[in-house]
Image (cartoon, helix red, strand yellow):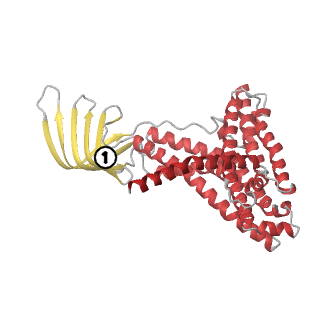
Amino acid sequence: MPFTSRLDRYIFRLTIVPLFGVFVLAASLLVLDQMLRLFRFITTEGGPVGVVFQMLGALLPDYASLAIPLGLLLGTLFAFRQLALSSELDVMRAVGLSYTRLLRVPFAITIVLMAVNATLVFYIQPVSKYYYEELQFDLRSGALGASIKVGEFTTLADRMALRIESSEDSGRQLQGIFARIVTEDGQVLSISAREGRFLSTSDDPDTIILRLSDGTIVQDPEGQSPRVLSFSMHDLPIDLPTIQSFRQRGEGEAEYILPELLRIGWSDSSSETQRNASQASFNYRMVELAMMLFMPLLAVALAIPPKRSTSALGVFVAVVLGVAYHKVNQYKQDFAGLGRIERVVGLWRAVGLLIGTIPGWFWQIAYVPGGQPIGALENAVSKVVKRIGRIIRPRRRSDAYRVEQAS
């Protein structure tokens, strides 16, 4: 069993630290990229800033499903790369420890992370996607106080135009208020006030009170001279607009949890479009999980550089393979959902190709003396670097020669 020896605990420590670091880094970069877009969206819609963090929290399960496999791959890779560069791996191999024995702990971590990722993609992620869409809907409809925008005229109940200069306390305290109201008898009122505050009423839940302070009212009755009234406090009733309720969860296959995917995807009562989309989503989530089983083998194959070399080409190849595999699966899911490719074979073809390649790479690094799975790529990159060096060095020498001649 894992963790029964000092060696297992040492490998666990070498693996878990970079694994956790890569996970936090990848998730943070994805969150920061989305945060800028959400702040622009909130600014446009005029909603409270706190909603940004609620929406980011709803996106975390989606980002974690990508960050967990990437963290597992790079965590194992950095652990074995450190062992190789410090020559500890040579010592372990010399005393009879095989790569399969050394991979005991990474595979134990893999099983745990697969269970976590399965819970995320089959249960938590669909619900969080729905919650994210619900927050977007509430922002656009004004259910989160986003209907009154700073510096713009907002129409309420088709008879009032309201403009404010600034707001505080999540939109409840307003400053610099101007309102233009058309009463039921056709009279036009223009109201300006220094500040105002929204208050709820117990009599009518569909009406709120805007309590204005230090302002004036200009009455402009038809056929009569306008009248100006000053006030220190005035209550202005506002009818709340009718807010449409959000749809039920399950509009798209991304919002289906596992039992719903199985029920809809293999039901004769479902339409062909629904079956294609549900089966494509199910197979997409499964191929993402299946690939995690081969992450430790791929990490070891790419972690160990050639002797007397500290090349980090394997790290670059691992990142490219991990991200490209995820993106290719996403595109294939979209095509399979539209019925353009076969929803089972089409999605499992990429993982089948890697499953057929990765064990061969691992066999070469583990059992072939001097074996290097990406040795050809290493040699090609080395030649390119040397050629670039030859092109740059003469220029440097010629520049130094010109400086000497000028001096």
Is residue 120 visible to us here?
no
Quadrant of the rendering where the N terminus is positioned: bottom right
Quadrant of the rendering where the C terminus is positioned: bottom left
Q: What residue is shown at x 50% (from left), y 39% (from top)? A: 137
Using the image as rendered, state which of residue 86 and residue 48 is in the foreground: 86
Is residue 209 visible to us here?
yes
Looking at the image, the residue that sits furthest to the bottom is: 6
Q: Mark 1 belongs to which amino acid?
A: Leu
Q: Quadrant of residue 91?
A: bottom right
Q: What residue is shown at x 36% (from left), y 42% (from top)? A: 148
Determine whether, in the image, residue 39 is placed left or right of residue 235: right
Using the image as rendered, state which of residue 217 and residue 95 is in the foreground: 95
Determine whether, in the image, residue 262 is placed left or right of residue 230: right
Q: Position of residue 143 (x, y in %)?
A: 45, 43
* Residue at disc 1, secondary structure: strand
Q: Position of residue 362 (x, y in %)?
A: 82, 52
Q: Which residue is mark 1?
A: 210
Using the image as rendered, state which of residue 104 and residue 270 is in the foreground: 104
Q: Residues within 10 Å of mark 1 (few under 14, many from 20)?
A: many
Q: Position of residue 379 (x, y in %)?
A: 72, 48
Vertical side of 88 occupied by 368: above or below: above
Q: Position of residue 8 (x, y in %)?
A: 79, 69
Using the image as rendered, state which of residue 103 and residue 88 is in the foreground: 88
